Image (cartoon, coloured by chain):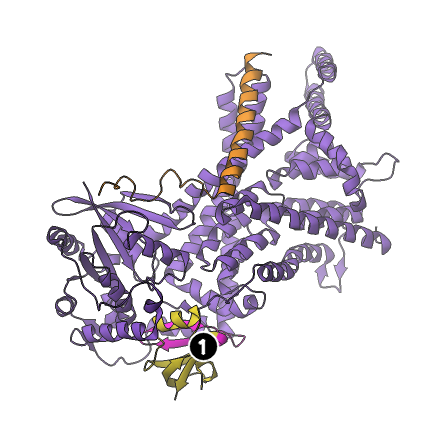
Amino acid sequence: MNLQAIIAIIIVLGAAFFIARRLWRSAKGHPDGACDKCGPMEGRKGK
Amino acid sequence: MKATIALAGNPNVGKTTLFNALTGLNQRTGNYPGVTVSWHAGTWILPDSDAELLDLPGSYSIAAHSPDEAVVQGVLRGLEGPRPDALLAIIDASNPERNLYFLSQLLDLELPTVVALNMGDVARDKGMAIDAATLARALGCRVVPVQANRREGIQALSEAMQDTLYEAKAAHGPGLPIDGPAAAEPETIRGRYLWARQKLVDSISRSAVHGLRLSDRVDRILTHKVWGVLAMVLLMGAVFQSIYAWSQPVMDLMDTGVHWLGGLLLRPIAPGILKELLANGVVAGMGSVLVFVPQIAVLFFFIAILEDCGYMARSAFLMDRLFARIGLSGRSFIPLLSSFACAVPGILSTRTIADRKERLTAMLVAPLMSCSARLPVYTIMIACFVPGRMLLGLVDQRALLLFALYALGLVVAVPVAWLVRKYMHAGAAPLFLIELPGYKWPDWRTVSRRVLEQCREFLSTAGTIILAVGIVVWALGAFPRDQARMAAFDAQRAAILAAPAGLTQTAALKQLDIDAQSDRLNHSALGWAGHAIVPAFAPLGWDWRISMAALASFPAREVVVGTLGTIFHSGGENDEGRLRDALKDAKREDGTPLFNLAVALSLMVFFALCAQCASTLAVITRESGHWGYAAFTFFYMTTLAWLGAAAIYHLTLWLGLS
Amino acid sequence: MTLDKLKDGQQATVQGLTLGSTAAVRLMEMGLFEGSPVRVLRRAPMGDPLEVQVGDYRLSLRKDEAALVRVQL
């Protein structure tokens, strides 16, 4: 198997994994795209 | 550390306009965790410092009757994190009592508060005037008159806020309960309104207004039984026409652009499996995602304008009766109507539906509205297999069939919506209650912010999933590959190249490529799946080729014509004439024609009712918060599609129409 | 007499509401409480919902929601 094939396989598996992870997270109730930034008050917990 | 200021107020009072005026281009957006309520934050540059301004969703009360209001409560009472340092409350001078009701709750939170008194122009129009200084004395906090849409009063407002931050003095309201059952008691509510009246009594002056205001005159027509409905039909027609007229050229341009760019970027890569993946999986996948953006942009452009100018509420008012019967409301009208163009923006726009159950129901039936991607399938099937004939001398039966296919989705949606809604244990029926705000010119900054936000959100969430699905489906259609078969095709290619160059050679090479592709598809995982499910689709009159086309078009329905081209060895969408001939000539194993009217109808009905669009399912997952809803949509629609297609197939045969 | 039974153009004063639902709370918060003046402006093409004037603004609500509001002409 040449380098091209390896890279291709990695990409395809990555895509499949990405889909699976999204489905898993949605089942657990994580809102996509917002968990990293849980609101504009983040970073002010010290106050 | 930067001070945090929350901006709160009723809906329709110019809050977003004020927010834009205060923060300029320094804005960030996101979503509150667990709900599809977005937050907007920006930097407000005050005279002596910079502050973080948080634009809260418009609310009528802190008592939280909707997800939006729950968020406001959460932020202001410090339930989700630290409380803001100060509060900027915006009130509408032309509607003071109800605005002061909410203000009374805000003041009872005892945060340092500044009040922005907006819409003085509308108040003057109504013969009202409020003296800011008198009101400030009565309330015990600073009141600054502003005209947000003309950016007047901003400087004074910033200075007032800076002073208030320095003083850090808590504001005081009527001292009535703001949470718990006591807050919902009639005495409490009335108490707040009486407090509001008392605060206004010295500040407000009213003079008699003669004649109807322009806003009222317009409303007379737009909510009229006859003229209002007519105006709405015309308006919706114009919106749809614009969607097709504006987005189609952009979509075509994008398609060409993406492929050109893809070709350019991929040229340095040696031909091979990776290049194929990138070209046919990634680039094609990206193309199929980007192609949604013009439709989303144009649709939300109109939705934002209609909402901002105040017409949205009127359309809900006019259509509510029809929707109430099946458990929805007039608020679902525009989202579901939008789905006739494309379900993706339609579903995104269901955010305007406050009631969660209604919103879910609307999302689950939105894909039944025949979207524009189904049109190529209808067109080609009708063109090939439905003879043109005038019915009653009035209308061509082909046009009637097209209309019937669109109507089919609508007709099926009614009982489905009713059932879904029923199943959700309605409990207390949600309130329809809508404020009908005065008409105003849309604010272009608000509109463009909305459009950009929706496009950005779509790309980052659904877009990524669609791309991933495109890659996976490509892989399923490209593997496993048989080296022996590939070698055979390579040998044929060599033979053609050995012959003299010319048009014949080019055509032969092209046909060979198509045949090779078709062969590979046939022997791939996808092809195997197509063959495997043939028994499932036999009652619909399909063979493995049609089944495979249906499977392969899952990531994006638009590719079905191209896929049909590959499967029937006739090239892509550019060769539609050839495809038509290929379809007409296609034969089954026993020599009988594959396609006839019955098969064509069953294919069209299947496409009309099936949820084959990965993009739609991705958006449903995102907006509903759980993939289960998308799965349900897929299963119920596929089942209906199968039943409908089988029924029409046998009915057509039985009636002898083929 | 309840709000939904008023004719187009009629003015009335709110006497009270049928309590016990979030609908009633919301209606009160929007200004429909005892002593408030209210006027029915018009109805939608199919007879439902209604458009009413409450204080300085306009509200649209369904007949069954309006039925919660007791009024006196």
Of residues B634 and B395, the one drawn nearer to the viewer in this rendering? B634
Q: Chain of mark 1?
A: C
Q: Quadrant of the C terminus of chain A?
A: top left
- For the image shown, how many numbered marks are present on the structure? 1
Q: Residue C46 lies in magenta, yes or no?
A: yes
Query: In the rendering, what colour is chain A?
Result: orange
| Amino acid type at image mark 1 | Ala
Q: Quadrant of residue B218?
A: bottom left
Looking at the image, can residue B176 be seen? yes
Give the left or right position of residue A32, taking residue B480 as reference. Answer: left
Residue B325 placement (x, y as % from top left): 58, 68
Q: Which chain is yellow?
A: C
Query: In the rendering, what colour is chain B?
Result: purple
Give the left or right position of residue B376, taking residue B602 as reference. Answer: left
Residue B569 placement (x, y as % from top left): 73, 30
Q: Residue B7 lies in magenta, yes or no?
A: no
Q: Does B366 sit above or below residue B551?
A: below
Q: Which residues are magenta?
A: C45-64
